[in-house]
Image (cartoon, helix red, strand yellow):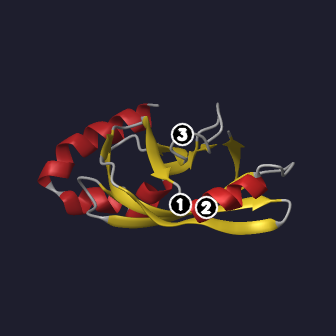
Amino acid sequence: MIKELLLSFFFKIFKKVIPIISRKIYPQKEFIKDIEIRAREQYPAIVVRLYGIPTIDVYLLIKNNSPYINVFLEGGIFSLWIKDDRGLGKLLNQVCINEKLNIKKKETKQIYRAIELKQSQIDYLKNTKASKELTVNIDLIVYIRSLLYNFIKTEVSLKNISCKIQ
């Protein structure tokens, strides 16, 4: 606790004066480890609506575990694979995340993206809806930056995410 307070105070002073020293004390690898991207847990992270305008809603969380600096999400790209009784099939390919977020120290924010489905995707999902076990895998590339580090590309694979088809 005291160590974190001292280091936080140190960063406030030195990140403006001597960024090289700050980077030595808080290396990029450690900074990247402090960024956590996961699916939301309380409700299904993926909700597919086949009525009205068919859409798929993706809910992800990005958490900044860094006790020292804020993180800026600059956007990203993801692909979504749906896993049912028949196996794994790609549903979405290279969908952009246009959201820009400022995530403060020890803060969590939601990334939300709604995608309108094409007829071939709707037909695939109608056949998938009857499956007993239905999960989703997401391959995600996000671009983050901070006051110490400019534009870092981070790749994340999220497996067995809950999915609900309505």
Task: Decide: is 85 above or below 3.
Answer: below
Residue 143 seen anywhere in this rendered image of the structure? no
Task: Decide: is 6 above or below 142.
Answer: above
The C terminus - image quarter: top right
The kind of secondary structure element at disc 1 is loop
Residue type indicated by callout 1: Lys
Instruction: Give the number of the disc on residue 121.
Output: 2
Residue bearing the label numbered 1: 118
Rounded to the nearest angstrom, the CA distance separating label 1 from label 2 is: 5 Å
| Residue 16 or residue 79, whichever sits in front | 79
> Are the residues at dot 1 and dot 2 in contact (C-beta closer than 8 Å)?
yes
Is 130 situated left or right of 89 in this image? right
Residue 47 rendering spot, x and y as whole percentages: 61, 42
Rounded to the nearest angstrom, the CA distance separating label 3 from label 1 is: 13 Å
The kind of secondary structure element at disc 3 is loop
Residue 84 rendering spot, x and y as whole percentages: 80, 58
Q: Disc 2 or 3, which lies upstream in sequence?
A: 3
Is 102 situated left or right of 87 in this image? left
Residue type indicated by callout 2: Gln
Residue type indicated by callout 3: Gly
Residue bearing the label numbered 3: 52
Residue 11 rendering spot, x and y as whole percentages: 26, 45
